[in-house]
Image (cartoon, grey):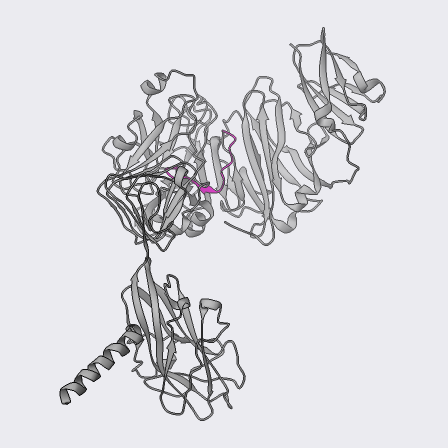
């Protein structure tokens, strides 16, 4: 009979355990005055594949005010329900795991004046409905909340439980949780396998373990997210251009992964591993290259790569890394004449900053490198340039936190402390996130984007040197195009090297004489998980603002190929003074550039490519000072134009260019401004001013597009307009800005013939009856 009783008791315990499930998170709360902690975590036991917050209290509650041991206690409970009066416990499954709950068990008790109404709610529905209303008493009372419902199964994200209480008759009344246990199970998430044509368990998501057991191409089969990713031996995963894959945790490659030039691979977990027994290749195609000696700026997206393996198609004696410890710019020269006067020209004084990289040089993650393409290979191309060339990086993807040392030489404090770094990931990174995470740099990113041919008069340490004005720039105020006219899109693509400058006020982690060492950091939060962010790649040839900024981009171009761009950005955080590179990015010293456009700031001798100004400064009285310099002696026709603009003020006001030299006011909103100039520096010739844009009836014709210039031969030209539009006035200027004609007869001007004798370029300015101002260029051969 005793044996039968033992058997029945064992059977009862077995079935009760099935109903209850095993403990996955528990705390007996046996401690001296645990209520002084918010939350309290001491003594808890938790499954290795989940994390817990401990037990805490809401903002409406306070500690009990007296020592209460072995229970988590609180006072300030109210008579009526208050949404801020609760205890809480938060549970998060680790990546690629999920929780199936069965019950939430706890002991509680109340004081004589404390609350008697108890209700448990969860974050599943935003704490709107009750999942249990247990009782409590003056002594320890056990409560069990049933969590076997479907809403508490397969939990793969953070969940929070709250215990609300009310009905207290006095604010000093207390209610406590004396212990708690969550029961259930924690298991790996769902697995799905690609067999070559379909998924065997549905398409994966960020919580799904994913196996590739057949070839997969993202262009054909689509982007996907996964918790863990395994590529089996014999299988190839191709991440094509304008596509991506996102993996929360680990990547295991027993087969092959190929990432095309504009494809992206993102890992979210900084501790995620990349294990490769097969092969991983990241391809990158250069931007169009016009000559073999044009440089591309590189960075390795994989670990263990070398210069010889990754940049095998480059010219062996034109592969370099930048030694910032050697960079010192205490003297400047003029026209590359090897003179040395005190000052800065953004050129290292003795030329030992660029160091030759050999085949065996390891490509350190986060460090930038530069190279030209092989002259022999470039010259062997059958077609005419420009050419694009594909390079290949092999090895495990870089992932997680990557720290890169940066340096400055404090024996000279007036120079710019340049450091060449690079995006270390096989995906684009967000420039704003990068700048926000690295306060030790001056707040701007410089991307090499060459267009200007090397010149013997550009300062440098070679007979012929490139122009420092050919960098595209991103900072907190906006972005400007470099030499090729392509503005960056506020992302830094994979494999891209770029310059930053170490601030004189940046954090120093090590000192060796005058050499100061700091660091920059890359992390996974900077990486961008989409198919469009990795499309730009520069070479040598996220955030919303409640007060929307106004931004104005102005280009300087010429008939001889000059290109220079400035951005003026009105936004919160900036002032009308020099705020540092995050808002005000100076141009590289480029006094020997053929021609350049820049902005100036009062009482500051710098030239700026990007200038941030206070948002409140933008009104009809605002003046933007433009500087212009040229080293061109031959007759050249320059053009100033608005490339683009953003913001309500700029869209609702006409933008005028004031040429103070010629005493002209020209509406840039209507047409470009053409001018000529002698050689020199002109910091006070041009200004931008504003006027309200008048409302007018729309015309059935676009006067700008409809004007036609016709040549009658023998140097005679005529101007034809649609019937609904007349020419109010016409002015013709030569390249020196001299006015040759000024006609104001509307009837005669509809198709007026004009005799031009000299073989040169003329500029015609027409005022139309619909208010348009049209500028035309006439070339007489």
Quadrant into which the C terminus falls: top right
Residue 495, visible in the rendered structure: yes
Q: Position of residue 503 (x, y in %)?
A: 42, 47
Say which residue appears at 38% left-offset and 23% top-offset: 293
Considering depth in this image, is 19 or 527 the residue closer to the camera?
Answer: 19
Please identify the quarter of the rendering in which residue 607 is found: top right
Q: Nearer the viewer, residue 418 or 146?
A: 146
Could you tell whether 498 is left or right of 605 in the image?
Answer: left
In the rendered view of the protein, which quadrant contains the N terminus?
Answer: bottom left
- Magenta residue span: 484-496
Decide whether residue 490 is among the magenta residues: yes
Q: Quadrant of residue 426?
A: top left
Q: Residue at x 49, y 68 (%)?
A: 126
Whole-percent x, y for residue 144 in the image: 36, 80
Q: Indicate the position of residue 313 as horizontal and vertical percent values.
A: 30, 26
| Rendered position, 399 above or below 90 | above
Is residue 418 among the parts visible in the rendering?
Answer: no
Q: Main secondary structure of the magenta part?
A: loop
Residue at (51, 36) in percent of width and height = 487
Relative to 393, is 245 above or below? below
Q: How many marks?
A: 0
- On whether residue 568 falls in the magenta region, the answer is no
Tell me: 221 left or right of 308.
Answer: right
Q: Is residue 375 above or below residue 59?
A: above
């Amino acid at each position: 009979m005793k044996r039968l009783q033992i058997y029945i008791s064992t059977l009862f315990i077995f079935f009760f355990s099935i109903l209850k499930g095993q403990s996955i998170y528990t705390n007996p709360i046996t401690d001296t005055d645990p209520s002084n902690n918010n939350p309290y975590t001491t003594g808890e036991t938790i499954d290795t594949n989940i994390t817990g917050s401990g037990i805490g209290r809401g903002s409406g509650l306070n500690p009990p005010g007296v020592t209460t041991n072995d229970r988590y206690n609180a006072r300030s409970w109210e008579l009526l329900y208050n949404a801020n009066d609760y205890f809480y416990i938060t549970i998060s499954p680790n990546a690629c795991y999920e929780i199936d709950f069965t019950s939430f068990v706890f002991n509680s008790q109340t004081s004589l004046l404390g609350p008697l109404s108890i209700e448990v709610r969860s974050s599943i529905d935003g704490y709107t409905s009750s999942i249990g209303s247990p009782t409590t008493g003056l002594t320890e009372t056990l409560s069990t909340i049933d969590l076997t419902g479907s809403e508490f199964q397969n939990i793969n994200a953070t969940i929070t439980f709250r215990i609300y209480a009310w009905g207290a008759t006095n604010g000093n009344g207390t209610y406590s949780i004396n212990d708690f246990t969550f029961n259930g199970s924690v298991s790996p998430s769902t697995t799905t396998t690609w067999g070559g044509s379909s998924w065997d368990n549905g398409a994966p998501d960020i919580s799904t373990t994913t196996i590739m057991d057949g070839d997969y191409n993202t262009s054909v089969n689509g982007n996907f997210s996964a918790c863990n990713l395994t590529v089996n031996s014999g299988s190839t995963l191709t991440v094509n251009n304008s596509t991506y894959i996102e993996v929360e945790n680990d990547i295991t490659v027993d087969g092959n992964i190929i990432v095309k030039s504009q494809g992206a691979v993102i890992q979210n977990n900084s501790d995620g591993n990349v294990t490769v027994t097969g092969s991983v290749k990241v391809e990158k195609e250069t931007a169009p290259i016009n000559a073999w000696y044009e440089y591309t700026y590189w960075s390795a997206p994989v670990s263990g790569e070398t210069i010889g393996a990754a940049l095998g198609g480059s010219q062996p004696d034109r592969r370099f890394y930048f030694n910032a410890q050697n960079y010192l710019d205490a003297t400047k020269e003029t026209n590359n004449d090897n003179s040395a006067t005190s000052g800065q020209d953004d050129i290292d004084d003795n030329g030992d900053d660029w160091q030759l990289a050999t085949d065996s040089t390891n490509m350190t993650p986060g460090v930038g490198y530069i190279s030209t393409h092989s002259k022999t290979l470039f010259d062997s191309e059958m077609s005419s340039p420009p050419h694009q060339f594909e390079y290949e990086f092999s090895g495990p993807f870089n992932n997680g936190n990557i720290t890169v040392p940066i340096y400055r030489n404090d024996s000279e404090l007036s120079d710019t402390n340049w450091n060449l770094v690079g995006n270390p990931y096989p995906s684009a990174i967000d420039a704003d996130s990068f700048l926000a995470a690295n306060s030790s740099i001056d707040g701007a990113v410089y991307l090499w984007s060459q267009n200007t041919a090397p010149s013997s008069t550009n300062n440098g340490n070679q007979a012929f040197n490139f122009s420092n004005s050919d960098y595209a720039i991103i900072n907190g105020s906006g972005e400007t195009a470099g030499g090729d006219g392509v503005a960056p899109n506020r992302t830094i693509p994979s494999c891209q090297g770029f310059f930053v400058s170490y601030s004189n006020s940046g954090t120093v982690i090590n000192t060796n004489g005058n050499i100061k060492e700091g660091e920059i950091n890359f992390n996974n939060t900077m990486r961008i998980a989409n198919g469009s962010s990795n499309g730009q790649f520069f070479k040598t040839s996220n955030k919303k603002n409640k007060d929307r900024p106004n931004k104005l981009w102005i280009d300087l171009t010429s008939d001889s190929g000059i290109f220079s761009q400035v951005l003026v950005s009105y936004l919160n955080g900036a002032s009308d003074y020099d705020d540092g590179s995050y808002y005000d990015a100076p141009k590289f010293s480029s006094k020997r550039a053929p021609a350049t456009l820049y902005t100036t700031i009062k009482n500051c001798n710098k030239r700026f490519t990007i200038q941030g100004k206070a948002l409140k400064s933008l009104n009809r009285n605002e003046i933007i000072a433009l500087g212009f310099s040229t080293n061109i002696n031959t007759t050249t026709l320059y053009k100033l134009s608005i490339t683009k603009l953003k913001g309500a003020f700029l869209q609702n006001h006409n933008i005028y260019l004031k040429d103070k030299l010629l005493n002209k006011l020209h509406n840039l909103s209507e047409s470009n401004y053409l001018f000529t100039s002698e050689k020199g520096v002109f910091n006070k010739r041009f200004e931008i001013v504003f006027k309200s844009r008048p409302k007018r009836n729309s015309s059935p014709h676009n006067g700008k597009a409809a004007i036609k210039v016709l040549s009658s031969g023998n140097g005679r030209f005529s101007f034809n307009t649609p019937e609904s539009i007349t020419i109010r006035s016409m002015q013709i200027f030569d390249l020196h800005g001299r006015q040759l004609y000024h006609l104001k007869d509307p009837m005669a001007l509809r198709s007026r013939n004009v005799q031009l004798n000299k073989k040169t370029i003329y500029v015609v300015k027409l005022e139309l009856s619909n208010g348009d101002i049209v500028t035309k260029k006439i070339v007489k051969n």
